[in-house]
Image: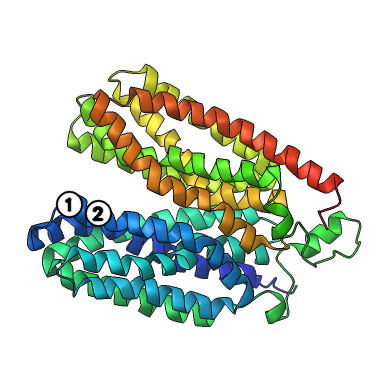
Amino acid sequence: MEKKKIHYAWWTLLALCIIVGIGKGSLSNSASLFLTPITKDLGVGLGSLSLYFSVSAIVTLIFLPIGGKILAKYDIRAVLIVGIILQAGSYVLFSFMSSVWGWYIMAIPLAVGGVFITVIAGPVLINQWFKKNSGLALGILGAAGGLLGAISQPIVGKLISSHGWRSSYVIVGIAAMVIIIPVVLLLIKKSPQAKGLLPYGVDEVAATNNGTAVNTEEKGVTFAIAKKSSAFYALLIFFFLVTSIASFSMHIPTYLMNKGFSVSFAGNIMGTLMIGVLIGSLIIGFLTDRIGSKNTALLAMAVGLISICLLVFTESNAGIITLAVGLFGVISSSIGTLGPALTASLFGNKEYSQIYSTASLGLAISSIVALPVYGYVYDFTGSYTVVLYALLAMLVINIIAILFAFKGKKKLEQDGFWK
């Protein structure tokens, strides 16, 4: 009996897990570990230094639509190599800075590279390679990113403690390039067709159609039509709100300590959050393939409502809070899984990269707005009660946005724009 060969789509997914995992987990997520050592060494304020995150978020906001067009036009391997050189190279150059202005300036190439590596490459390539199990692939990508982040964070922390922040920037930046560039060159292909293959699962889709040949030509809505549709604006709202909701995770330690819990307990709870993200990524990916992105998104928002209700109506029960934060991790994981899946369901594959990158503006805007707003609310009121009720409202609005988006898709189909 002939042994069944592993489809190249899975090798592409493995490469993406490494690329996105290192770009997001080892670079983006480790940035906060450098802040305190830098401020102590240079004698600058934490607020002044951390402003470079805002610069990065604004650049991301501006560059996302451009990045989608570049990815659609040029060889994705060349784009990814340039992307990691910009992102990781900025880390190397951070090591030479002695003024906060250096971080503000280098935040520009850092963000431009990050757009390709951490935001749009994964969803675009998975959408190209997976006709079947695309939701599971997105879930695995999200889980792998979280896992690599969980592994790399302690390593980066120890590097900073033993070698100082300047050397650590260089080590982390060069290591990221040394790992990612060969992975891109060896495993990433421009498209399945460039390797003489069909996307994964095309043959099984044909079997379900009684052997009818499957048209592998990309179908869907053009970007020009999509951006004028009600479905697009509903998706944009979903992206903005789901990111705003997930952003509350950064305030969970303060929320817990405000309730009288210890720093140690807060640290353990954040570990529970990461477990929720890992498990949530896989479950959401699996369910997307089984019951569709619409039903999975509605279910995820319902889980979010349960999570926030538990936080609102419990005082100091450690067990309930642990459960609530674990469930909240599911919402956090939905950014990387549901967002791309909903985009594909609503608008198809025809001009996916441009549509997804533009809809992702909601993510970038939220990154600029939500975090400081939650902090100001806490400063003015002394608690997160108002924020928690706002999160409940956002979850309800997101349920409405999902239903409205699919109603908009039906109109696009009726008007003959889905081709």
Residue ID at (39%, 40%) = 370
* Numbered circle sitting on residue 46: 1
Q: Is residue 375 above or below residue 165?
A: above
**Neighbourhood count class around disc 1 (C-alpha, 10 Å): few under 14, some 14–19, many 20 upward:** few
Secondary structure at badge 2 equals: helix
The N terminus appears in which quarter of the rendering?
Answer: bottom right
- Label pair 2/1, CB-CB below 8 angstroms: yes
Q: Nearer the viewer, residue 228 or 250?
A: 228
Residue occupied by mark 2: 50
Q: Position of residue 28 (x, y in %)?
A: 35, 60
- 401 with respect to 99 (left or right): right
Look at the image and tell me in which quarter the C terminus lies. Answer: bottom right
What residue do we see at 45% from left, 34% from top?
327
Q: Position of residue 164 (x, y in %)?
A: 13, 67
Q: What is the secondary structure assignment of the residue under circle 1?
A: helix
Residue 282 vs residue 328: left or right? right
Q: Of residues 36 and 282, which is closer to you in this image?
A: 36
Q: Amino acid at mark 2?
A: Ser
Figure check: 191 above or below 345: below
- Can the viewer see residue 228? yes
* Residue type indicated by callout 1: Leu
The residue depicted at 24 percent of the width and 41 percent of the height is 267
The Cα–Cα distance between marks 2 and 1, rounded to whole angstroms, is 6 Å
